[in-house]
C-alpha cells in the first residue's frame, strides 16, 4: 500500500511539473483589444473569471499563487507603449512571442452620488515557458478595465489593455486609488528599480483619464530610496482640497529621509542625492531632512511650482 501511494505521488508530481513547464499559448481574436468592447457581468463580479472573459487564453494556477492567462494574437497589429524604465528599442503590444496576463488589483469605489464602480488592473508580461516574469529593467505593462454597477449587473465603461509599463522584472507595482478632484479618480504607482546590489530609487507616478485614455500625468523623482547603508528617504502625497479647483487639484509631495555617512558599508554604490540636500552631504556627517514640493496641473501634465521647502534636523 505504501508503495502504491508513493507511486501515485510521483505520478501526480510529474504531471504537475510537466504542467508548469509545458505552458501553452491560445490564439485569440484581435477583437479582444477593442477599447469599445461591450461586457456585462452579473453581481458579484468574479475578478479572475472576468479577466478570462477579457483575455480568453489558457488559465494557469501554478505554485506560489502564480495565476495568469497565457495567450497570443496572430491577427493583432502591435502598437508602441511607454516603459518608464527607458528601455531602448521599440516596445510593442501585444508581444509577438505571446503574453502572460495576471490580475494586479481589484479596486472598488463610489462617487458622491452613490454610484458604484470597480477597476480591474492587469499586468502583461512576455510569455515564458516556465511561467516566470523576467527582464531586469523591463516594466510590467499595466492594463485597466472600468465597470459601473447597474442594478445587479456590472457594465464595462472603459477598457484599455495597455497603458504603460512600470516596475522591474516585468512586474508592475499595484496601483492605488487617489481622488484628485470632485468625483475625479486616478491611480498612484511607485515605480522602483536599480542596479544589482545597489540602491533602489522610487518614482511616484499618477495615472488618470485624459483625452479619452488613461495615461501618466505626474512623474515625481526622488520619491523613495531603499537598499542603501547610509541614506534613505520615503515620500507621501496630499491632494490640496481647494474650492477654486474642481478637477486636477494641486498635489503636495513630502519626502523625509536620513543621512549618516559613518554608517556607510564597504560596498560603495553611487547614490544621486536630492539637489536640496547635496551641499549638506559634503559638510555634515549625519542629519535628517524633509523636502516639500508642490505640483500644479498645467496643460496635460503636473509641473512643480515654486522652490521646494527644505527642513533639516539632528545635524552632526
Image: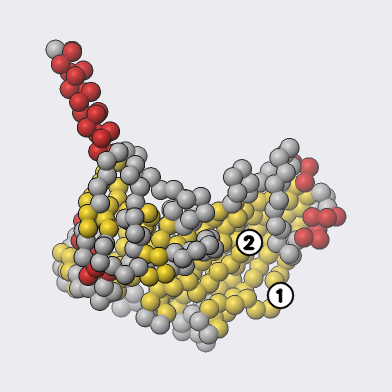
Q: Residue at x 70, y 57 (%)?
A: 272
Q: Nearer the viewer, residue 129 or 254?
A: 129
Note whether residue 259 is visible.
yes
Question: Most extreme residue toward the right, as rendered?
Answer: 283
Q: Judge left or right: residue 306 versus residue 56.
A: right
Q: Nearer the viewer, residue 102 or 238?
A: 102
Image coords of residue 109 (percent x, y): 33, 67
SS of the residue under disc 1: strand
Q: On the image, which quarter does residue 54 sit in? A: bottom left
Callout 1–callout 2 Cβ contact below 8 Å = no
Using the numbered discs, state the Cα–Cα distance from disc 1 to disc 2 in whole angstroms: 15 Å
Q: Residue at x 62, y 53 (%)?
A: 225
Report the residue marked by disc 1: 307
Residue 222: assigned label: 2
Q: On the image, which quarter does residue 4 sit in? A: top left
Q: Nearer the viewer, residue 217 or 141?
A: 141
Image coords of residue 274 (percent x, y): 70, 62
Q: Residue at x 27, y 41 (%)?
A: 22
Q: Judge left or right: residue 194 versus residue 282.
A: left
Image coords of residue 298 (percent x, y): 55, 83
> In terms of sequence position, does the residue under pointer 1 or pointer 2 come before the other?
2
Q: Judge left or right: residue 123 versus residue 269.
A: left
Q: Residue at x 74, y 65 (%)?
A: 276
Q: Nearer the viewer, mark 1 or mark 2?
A: 2
Callout 1: few (<14), some (14-19), or many (20+) C-alpha neighbours within 10 Å?
Answer: few
Q: Nearer the viewer, residue 221 or 254?
A: 221
| 70 vs 176: above or below | above
Image coords of residue 208 (percent x, y): 43, 73
Residue 216: assigned label: none
Q: Quadrant of the N terminus?
A: top left
Amino acid at each position: 500500500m505504501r508503495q502504491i501511494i508513493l507511486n501515485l505521488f510521483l505520478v501526480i508530481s510529474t504531471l504537475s511539473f510537466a504542467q508548469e513547464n509545458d505552458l501553452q499559448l491560445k490564439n485569440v481574436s484581435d477583437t479582444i483589444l477593442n477599447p469599445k468592447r461591450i461586457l456585462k457581468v452579473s453581481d458579484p463580479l468574479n475578478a479572475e473569471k472576468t479577466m478570462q472573459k477579457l483575455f480568453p487564453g489558457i488559465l494557469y494556477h501554478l505554485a506560489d499563487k502564480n495565476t495568469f492567462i497565457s495567450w497570443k494574437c496572430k491577427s493583432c497589429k502591435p502598437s508602441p507603449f511607454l516603459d518608464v524604465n527607458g528601455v531602448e528599442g521599440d516596445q510593442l503590444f501585444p508581444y509577438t512571442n505571446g503574453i502572460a496576463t495576471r490580475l494586479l488589483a481589484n479596486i472598488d469605489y463610489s462617487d458622491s452620488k452613490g454610484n458604484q464602480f470597480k477597476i480591474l488592473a492587469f499586468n502583461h508580461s512576455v510569455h515564458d515557458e516556465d511561467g516566470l516574469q523576467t527582464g531586469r529593467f523591463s516594466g510590467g505593462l499595466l492594463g485597466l478595465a472600468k465597470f459601473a454597477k447597474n442594478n445587479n449587473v456590472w457594465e464595462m465603461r472603459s477598457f484599455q489593455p495597455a497603458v504603460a509599463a512600470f516596475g522591474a522584472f516585468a512586474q508592475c507595482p499595484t496601483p492605488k486609488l487617489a481622488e484628485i478632484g470632485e468625483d475625479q479618480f486616478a491611480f498612484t504607482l511607485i515605480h522602483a528599480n536599480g542596479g544589482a546590489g545597489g540602491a533602489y530609487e522610487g518614482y511616484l507616478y499618477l495615472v488618470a483619464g485624459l483625452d479619452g485614455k488613461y495615461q501618466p500625468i505626474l512623474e515625481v523623482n526622488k520619491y523613495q530610496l531603499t537598499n542603501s547603508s547610509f541614506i534613505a528617504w520615503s515620500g507621501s502625497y496630499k491632494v490640496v482640497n481647494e474650492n477654486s479647483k474642481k478637477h486636477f487639484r494641486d498635489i503636495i509631495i513630502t519626502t523625509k529621509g536620513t543621512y549618516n555617512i559613518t554608517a556607510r558599508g564597504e560596498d560603495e554604490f553611487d547614490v544621486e542625492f536630492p539637489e536640496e540636500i547635496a551641499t549638506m552631504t559634503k559638510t555634515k556627517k549625519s542629519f535628517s531632512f524633509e523636502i516639500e514640493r508642490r505640483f500644479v496641473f498645467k496643460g496635460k501634465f503636473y509641473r512643480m511650482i515654486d522652490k521646494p521647502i527644505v527642513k533639516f534636523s539632528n545635524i552632526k
